[in-house]
Amino acid sequence: MRAAAGALCLFALALPARGADETPTQPSPSAPAGPEPHAGPGAGSASLSVAEPVVQLQAAAPAEARPPSQRPTRRWGVGLELAPFVSPKPHAGIPLGAGDHLPVALTLRWEFTRNTAVSGGFGAPGSDSGLAAWAGYELFTTVASIRTGLIEVDLYATPGLQLGFAGPGYYARHDNVFVGWDYEHAGPIEFATRLPLGLRLRWLHRRFDTYAEVTGTLAVSPSVDVLTGMSTGVRLNF
């Protein structure tokens, strides 16, 4: 009996020690666990304050990156040109009676940048020459735009070259004789440089143009001559 009682006493003393070992550890009050980033109201406000500028930057970026308003892409143009005022008096073109003529030509233009183009023509030029073809490199600038391109005003210069027939006017200037209208497309070949300076109106967002220009022509063959003329024209663009 004494042996059994002693064993029970030792068993009872061992129980508290095992319970203390198995007690789960509690978090230290000096180091509380922080809230989850998405749980507290403070975290939500912080995320909003960081996200708002990002959203604003993303919204502003397309506006800043957006290129300036582009002009309508109408690179090619064909037209008709008349030269009502030419000095010396022209001897080529549409007969008007009393020996007068109105030079007429077909024109072609290709605009390949915002300020440059290549233009040319074929027919009776704005000079006292026969039938000819010419081409030039055009430099232009838009000086006014009304109602966002509904009407535009351009200034331009087109230095270029001209090759054709000297025409009846050549003999009238140098020999004071009239050799006949056939020399509009026959006779000696004339090579010249030319410089048109003009003003152009562009209508209906560049659908068509009207223009007026003054052209100085320096013929270097068959002899040196200085010829001048004023031309007007209309051109359809596409």
Image (spheres, helix red, strand yellow):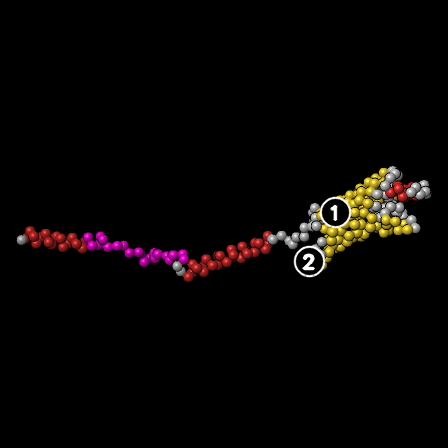
What number is the disc on residue 148? Answer: 2
**Magenta residues?**
18-38
Give x and y (percent) for residue 16.
Answer: 18, 55
Q: Nearer the viewer, residue 237 or 155?
A: 237
Q: What's under tag 2, amino acid-wise? A: Thr
**Callout 1: SS:** strand
Tell me: 44 left or right of 222: left
Q: Earlier in the sequence, mark 1 or mark 2?
A: 1
Circle 2 packing at 10 Å, graded few (<14), some (14-19), many (20+), is: few
Residue 227: numbered disc: none
Helix, strand or loop under label 2 = loop
Tell me: residue 44, above or below residue 219.
below
- Residue found at x 75% / y 46%: 108
Residue drawn at the location 45% of the way across and 60% of the way down: 45
The vertical placement of 62 against 223, above or below, is: below
Is 37 one of the magenta-colored residues?
A: yes
Q: Nearer the viewer, mark 1 or mark 2?
A: 1
Location of mark 1 (residue): 109
Percent position (x, y) of residue 182? 88, 42
What residue do we see at 79% from left, 47% from top? 106
The foreground one among 33 and 28 is: 33
Position of 10 relative to 182 (above/below): below
